[in-house]
Image: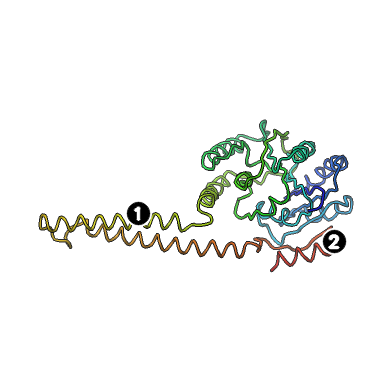
Amino acid sequence: MRRGISIVLPVYNERESIGPLLKELDPVVSTLNYEVEVIAVNDGSRDGTTEELDRLAGDYPYLKIIHFRKNEGQTAAFDAGFQYSQFEIVITMDADGQNDPADIPKMVALIEEGCDFVSGWRRKRRDSWLRTIPSRLANRLIRLVTGTHLHDLGCSLKAYRSEFVKELRLFGEMHRFIGVLMVQSGARTQEMEVNHRPRELGQSKYGIFRTFKVLVDLVTVWFMRGFGQKPSYVFSGVGGLLLASSVLLSIFVLWQKFQFGYWVHRNPLFMIGIFIALAGIQFVGLGLLAEISIRTYHDAAQVPTYRIARLTGFDQDQQDNLRRLANQ
């Protein structure tokens, strides 16, 4: 991997914010002792952001743009930026101007000191209570379920060694669990307090309903954490317990038959045992289906969940590679 820094910016309807952000980012880029590329992933914007990014590409030679065909979500935007970055250090941040570019050199310094992953912590968050309270509750729940010590999993300002993000396969709202996935992958992790600023331009894209999506993906992360490689263990384990319970119940029914003369077909425990046995067989079958699905997933893991409309700022070899991977 080449020496340098790739800064990934997911952009969705940020026509007013993207110009001021790049203007603020430019002096920071010039102070870094690295070659730098800024990859703006335009996530199907419809407010003029597309035209604004194309215009800004002429002002900033290090700016590269991936235009999605339609809105795919922030997770897909991060995934595209990760897979198509070319330098050894990757930085992510929001395009709304709330993350402070001045924190980037400090994160890079921690990577240089030996960290694999630096996670930003917006300790003094400048958002409304409608965003901060659900976020804090979600972070506590995620820490409880996953055992991760990070305080602010939703902060986009992060720094990574490239080899770790290249291994990530993101879907759904999984960008919120990148910190969890990094810790689980064995990355040497450091948390750093970062400056958080109020949004001055544009409108927030976040809503309280995203909390429900996070809860669904949390279940997925928990399952993949324990059984991602062998899902049949959990399903077949439950199925085996149910089948064993059914056998024990059947023995008890037979004992009642010979001890007290109960008719088997009139004994409600007999029907309950049959239903438990059927449930056990179904769980074993689900385990086999899950095993097949996981293997299919790993076989298809190279197929992205987004489609690219066009590219700006990439050289021809990069463009050919991007189109081949994204549209196969």
Residue sitting nearer the eye, 274 or 245: 245
The structure residue drawn at horizontal position 17% and vertical position 61%, both measured from the top left corner, is 264
For disc 1, the marked residue is 241
Up/down of 235 relative to 118, above or below:
below
- Left or right, 233 with reference to 243: right
Disc 2 marks which amino acid? Answer: Asp
Give how far across and how far down residue 184 sits, in percent.
59, 46
Up/down of 155 relative to 63, above or below:
above
* View extreme (top): residue: 124
- Disc on the earlier residue, 2 or 1: 1
Give how far across and how far down residue 223 sits, in percent.
51, 51
- Left or right, 278 with reference to 27: left
| Quadrant of the image occupied by residue 93 | top right
Give how far across and how far down residue 111 sits, in percent.
75, 41
Disc number lying in front (2 or 1): 1
Crowding around mark 1 (Cα neighbors within 10 Å: few <14, some 14 to 19, many 20+) is some
Label 2: state its secondary structure: loop
Q: Are the residues tagged 2 and 1 within 8 Å (C-beta)?
A: no
Label 1: state its secondary structure: helix
| Label at residue 197 | none
For disc 2, the marked residue is 315
Residue sitting nearer the eye, 309 or 152: 152
Disc 1 marks which amino acid? Answer: Leu
In three-dimensional space, the C-alpha distance between marks 2 and 1, rounded to whole angstroms, equals 58 Å
The structure residue drawn at horizontal position 78% and vertical position 44%, both measured from the top left corner, is 17
Crowding around mark 2 (Cα neighbors within 10 Å: few <14, some 14 to 19, many 20+) is few
**Quadrant location, the C terminus:** bottom right
Up/down of 225 relative to 267, above or below:
above
